[in-house]
């Protein structure tokens, strides 16, 4: 439901549902982070990510993609670089779509870096 409301840009209700959860899991954290980022609220997405980290929830590949996109929107290059190198799951990357997405984001981050200098 959080993903649904966030996808419909009803972020207030998505956050209300999230806050009412007894123990949010990685799927609900990711839905809220991605919802904020996809609707242009990178700051809120990063705040939720920092809260997730503070709560001891380990980011997965979906989290990393959402936060890297937020970093690209905000030109937070240092955090973006750290996250791009972050390995949420040890071992080889089996998901080619994930790897293509991460490479595309790396290109965006590099362009932002070049434009900043």
Image (cartoon, grey):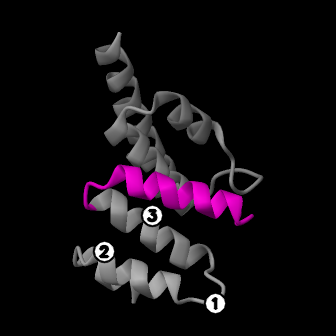
State which region is magenta: 39-59
Alpha carbons under labels 2 and 3: distance apart: 10 Å
Helix, strand or loop at label 3? It is helix
Tell me which residue sits at (69%, 47%) in the image.
87
Q: Residues within 10 Å of mark 2 (few under 14, many from 20)?
A: many
Of the 4 image quadrants, the one containing the C terminus is top left
Which mark is first along the chain, 1 or 3?
1
Q: Which mark, by number, is residue 11?
A: 2
Tell me which residue sits at (25%, 78%) in the image.
10
Q: Main secondary structure of the magenta part?
A: helix
Q: Position of residue 20 (x, y in %)?
A: 52, 89
Q: Residues within 10 Å of mark 3 (few under 14, many from 20)?
A: many
22 over 56 or under it: above or below? below
Q: Nearer the viewer, mark 2 or mark 3?
A: 2
Residue under label 1: 22
89 over 28 or under it: above or below? above
Which of the 4 quarters of the picture holds residue 83? top right
- Is 87 on the left or on the right of 3, as rendered? right
Q: Residues within 10 Å of mark 1 (few under 14, many from 20)?
A: few
């Amino acid at each position: 439901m959080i993903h649904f409301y966030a996808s419909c840009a009803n972020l207030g209700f998505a956050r209300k549902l999230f806050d009412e959860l007894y123990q949010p899991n990685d799927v609900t954290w990711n839905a809220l982070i991605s919802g904020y980022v996809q609707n242009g609220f990178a700051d809120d997405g990063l705040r939720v990510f920092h809260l997730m980290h503070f709560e001891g929830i380990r980011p997965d590949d979906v989290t990393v993609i959402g936060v890297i996109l937020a970093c690209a929107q905000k030109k937070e290059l240092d955090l973006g670089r750290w996250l791009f190198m972050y390995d949420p799951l040890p071992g080889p990357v089996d998901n080619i779509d994930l790897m293509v997405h991460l490479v595309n984001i790396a290109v965006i981050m590099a362009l932002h870096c070049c434009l900043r200098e």
